[in-house]
Amino acid sequence: MRELMPLAERAGALLKAHRQTIALNESSTGGLISAALLAVPGASAYYIGSVVVYTRQAWDAVRDFREAELGGIRAATEHNALVRARIARERFATVWGVGETGAAGPTGNRYGDPAGHTCVGVVGPLERAVTLRTGKSDRLENMHAFAEAALKLLIECLEAQK
């Protein structure tokens, strides 16, 4: 996780400078994005909370979740990542939400996406989503690459806000 720290520190500094808060809804990163943000001293100034929604069963545990919120779109898409980010932002009442969904490996997911595929969404004063395909099957390496992509997208959004 140490390689994620410069990005987490930058994101934390931007969130603090803007006096903004963040919540996350992670899947294939298993909470790694949250762990990086929380490893930054003073994270309580911006970090409110997160959920790891890894399975369909986990969605049922999300309070007041309605299937219609997903709009019939499967996981591991940019649309799904943005929905996850919106849910985190709304449920935790934060300025920013980050959503992530993918297939860490060593095999692909049930939707046909290969190992190393993820989608990340950031929602706040602006919205952006990206898709990353590492081309690798190493689960841990992919989880770190996914978290790195999420932190980079978050920083991009924090720097672009008006």
Image: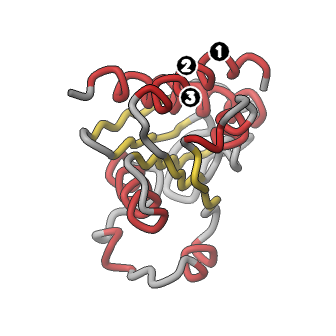
Place of residue 148 in the rendered image (x, y in percent of width and height, measured from the top left):
59, 25
- The residue carrying pointer 2 sits among few (fewer than 14), some (14 to 19) or many (20 or more) residues within 10 Å by Cα, namely some
Of the pair 137 and 99, the residue shown nearer to us: 99
Of the pair 26 and 13, the residue shown nearer to us: 13
> Which picture quadrant has residue 94?
bottom left
Label 1 sits on residue: 6
What separation in Å lies between label 1 and label 2 (alpha carbons)? 6 Å
Camera-nearest label, 1 or 3: 3
**Residue 10 visible in the shown view:** yes
Residue plotted at (53% across, 37% down): 117
**Residues at badges 1 and 2 in contact (C-beta under 8 Å)?**
yes
Residue plotted at (35% across, 51% down): 82
Place of residue 17 in the rendered image (x, y in percent of width and height, measured from the top left):
44, 26
**Residues at badges 3 and 2 in contact (C-beta under 8 Å)?**
yes
> Which picture quadrant has residue 57?
bottom right
Q: Which mark is residue 10?
A: 2
Place of residue 137 in the rendered image (x, y in percent of width and height, measured from the top left):
71, 32
Residue type at mark 2 is Arg
